[in-house]
Image (spheres, helix red, strand yellow):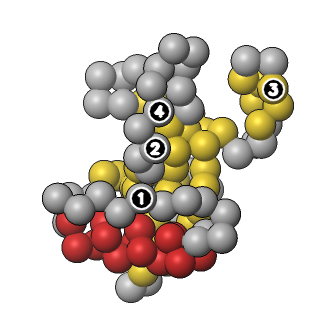
Amino acid sequence: MEENFDGEELDNIITLNDENGNEVKFEFLDLVELENEQYVVLLPVLEEGEEDDGEVVILKVEDTDEDSDEESYVSVDDEETLMQVFNIFKEKFKDEFDFVDDAE
């Protein structure tokens, strides 16, 4: 899928609607499989002037209809599942990204 974004051609940008119906653009980083479920790892695409906090968004992939190829993405409330998916992602991309462990 190709979209023009600020004059640049990016082939890994997807647009989703947030809970308020607003369109939000994300850069697709990876698809992670965990316990027979699939999760997408997305990075919000910032508008000019927005500050980058570097946080990714992890959503679970759900098929909406067996007869169509459409998928929907749902938020994951289970913190343990989120951390497992993120750790798989970090391991796969440890040489491409500088990860900062956010100890709370």
As shown in the figure, which amino acid type bears the numbered disc 2? Gly
Residue 34 vertical position relative to residue 58 in the rendered view, above or below: below
* C-alpha distance separating marks 2 and 3: 21 Å
Mark 3 residue crowding within 10 angstroms, few (<14) / some (14–19) / many (20+): few
Foreground: 71 or 60?
60
Mark 1 residue crowding within 10 angstroms, few (<14) / some (14–19) / many (20+): few
Foreground: 35 or 87?
87
Mark 4 residue crowding within 10 angstroms, few (<14) / some (14–19) / many (20+): few
Earlier-in-chain disc, 1 versus 2: 2
Point out the frontmost of discs 3 and 4. 4
Earlier-in-chain disc, 2 versus 3: 3
Contact, CB < 8 Å: mark 1 with mark 2?
A: yes
Q: Position of residue 16 (x, y in %)?
A: 49, 35
- Give the residue at mark 1: 100
- Give the residue at mark 3: 8
Contact, CB < 8 Å: mark 4 with mark 2?
A: yes
In this picture, residue 32 sits left or right of residue 100: right
Q: Position of residue 40 (x, y in %)?
A: 50, 59
